[in-house]
Amino acid sequence: QVQLVESGGGLVQAGGSLRLSCAASGSIVRVNNMGWYRQAPGKQRELVVVITPDGSTNYADSVKGRFTISRDNAKNTVYLQMNSLKPEDTAVYYCNAGVVAGDYYAMTYWGKGTLVTVSS
């Protein structure tokens, strides 16, 4: 069983910063791509950014230059540093990872989400 656990959400004023973390745990052979998605009230879930095992990244245009993703492969953990936050960044942020588990099957896993609220 593999679990993704997010932390670091909260309430922040516009222009502020937050750092999200997501740790994968369980019977893990290998973690492939990791990423963050978000879902604002009344909207569909959207990709924020994804990072490959070798560090290549792909950001949504709306967060380029403000958000930075990083990962610690030894800890199976991904981070999202969010700077210059805007009220439109308010959403539940979900961690996502492609994981090869102990049975050697690859699956996509999701965290339960962490709420980020940016006040104006």
Image (cartoon, grey):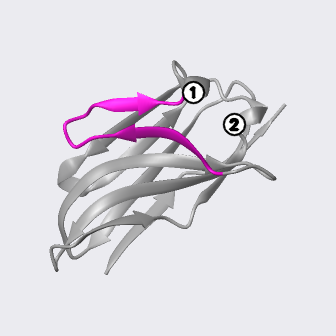
Is 63 drawn above or below residue 108 in the view shown?
A: above
Report helix, strand or loop for mark 1: helix
Q: Position of residue 53 (x, y in %)?
A: 22, 43
Report helix, strand or loop for mark 2: helix
Q: Is residue 117 magenta?
A: no
The answer to whether residue 78 is left or right of residue 46 is left
Residue in the image at 54% along x and 55% along y: 94
Kindly identify which numbered label has been placed on residue 89.
2
In the rendered structure, which segment of residues is drawn in magenta?
A: 45-60
Marks 1 and 2: in contact by CB < 8 Å? Answer: yes
Kindly identify which numbered label has been placed on residue 83.
none
Sequence-first disc among 2 and 1:
1
Residue in the image at 25% along x and 46% along y: 72
Kindly identify which numbered label has been placed on residue 63.
1
Residue in the image at 72% along x and 29% along y: 86
Is 108 drawn above or below residue 78 in the view shown?
A: below
Residue at mark 2 to residue at mark 1: CA–CA distance:
9 Å
Q: Position of residue 43 (x, y in %)?
A: 75, 49
Q: Amino acid at mark 1?
A: Val
